[in-house]
Image: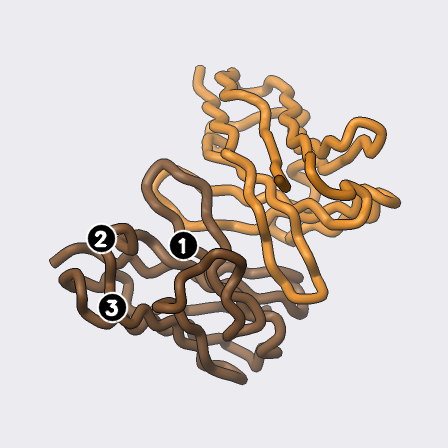
Chain colours: A brown, B orange
Amino acid sequence: EIVLTQSPGTLSLSPGERATLSCRASQSVSSSYLAWYQQKPGQAPRLLIYGASSRATGIPDRFSGSGSGTDFTLTISRLEPEDFAVYYCQQYGSSPLLTFGGGTKVEIK
Amino acid sequence: EVQLVQSGAEVKKPGESLKISCKGSGYSFTSYWIGWVRQMPGKGLEWMGIIYPGDSDTRYSPSFQGQVTISADKSISTAYLQWSSLKASDTAMYYCARYNPDWNWFDPWGQGTLVTVSS
């Protein structure tokens, strides 16, 4: 069973700062099958990144994804006020077929 | 515009049955999988299962196998999530989302259906 561990649990930063979020898998994950989502309070999640590094349609280029194997990173180059939210990574692979990480909350410092 | 619209909030008693829906529009409903995701109050996202409306092929998370039933009616572009006997622990927000296994993404997501189970 693949487990995705996200760290830190909470990231306290100021607007304009750089955010670096980690997603670590218990087994190797194909880069093609690692995605990131953003969820704001009271809203459904939104796809940000798929294939570890490809931005979804309409996602600003301040969001970038990288990584391979068991270590993946979501970077927000300069935080905008609307970026304060919870971020989840998600993989497709072996049993269970699909898994989400526990989430990282990016909060205003 | 690709859109998934879910049925409204439900309040049920333990032991009751329930079926919630997710209607797709703006794309070929039979060409993409639909997934269901649970979010318990204040918690993270949990994948429940996916269905391919084209042939009703369904895959469940081991955590939800036997606990829920996922189905679809392609004639009306609608997927369903149902329970035969609700428990208080089923209280959660449930999201549907279009799923593409070629690139592993859920997009877009429905607005969510809040299910409250309380005596």
Residue marked by disc 3: A78
Pointers 2 and 3 in contact (CB under 8 A)? no
Quick one: SS at disc 3? loop
Chain ID for label 1? A
Closer to the chain start, of discs 3 and 1, is 1
Quadrant location of the N terminus of chain A? bottom right
Q: CA distance from mark 2 to mark 1?
A: 14 Å
Q: Say above or below: B66 vs A49.
A: above
Q: How far across and how far down the image is residue A95, in percent? A: 66, 65
Residue marked by disc 1: A38
B11 or A37, nearer to the observer? A37
- Residue under the point 66% across and 36% down: B68
Q: Looking at numbered disc 1 in the image, what kind of residue is underneath it?
A: Gln
Closer to the chain start, of discs 2 and 1, is 1
Q: CA distance from mark 2 to mark 3?
A: 10 Å
Q: How far across and how far down the image is residue B25, in percent? A: 69, 35
Q: How far across and how far down the image is residue B20, in percent? A: 63, 26
> Which circle, 2 or 1, is nearer the viewer?
2
Quick one: SS at disc 2? helix
**Counting other residues with Cα less than 10 Å from the Cα at mark 3, is it few (<14), some (14-19), or many (20 or more)?**
some
> Which circle, 3 or 1, is nearer the viewer?
3
**Counting other residues with Cα less than 10 Å from the Cα at mark 1, is it few (<14), some (14-19), or many (20 or more)?**
many
Q: Looking at numbered disc 3 in the image, what kind of residue is underneath it?
A: Arg
User: Can you tell which quarter of the image residue A76 is in?
Assistant: bottom left
Q: How far across and how far down the image is residue B61, in percent? A: 64, 52
Quick one: SS at disc 1? strand
Q: CA distance from mark 3 to mark 1?
A: 16 Å
Residue A81 is marked as: 2
Quadrant location of the C terminus of chain A? bottom left
Q: Looking at numbered disc 2 in the image, what kind of residue is underneath it?
A: Pro
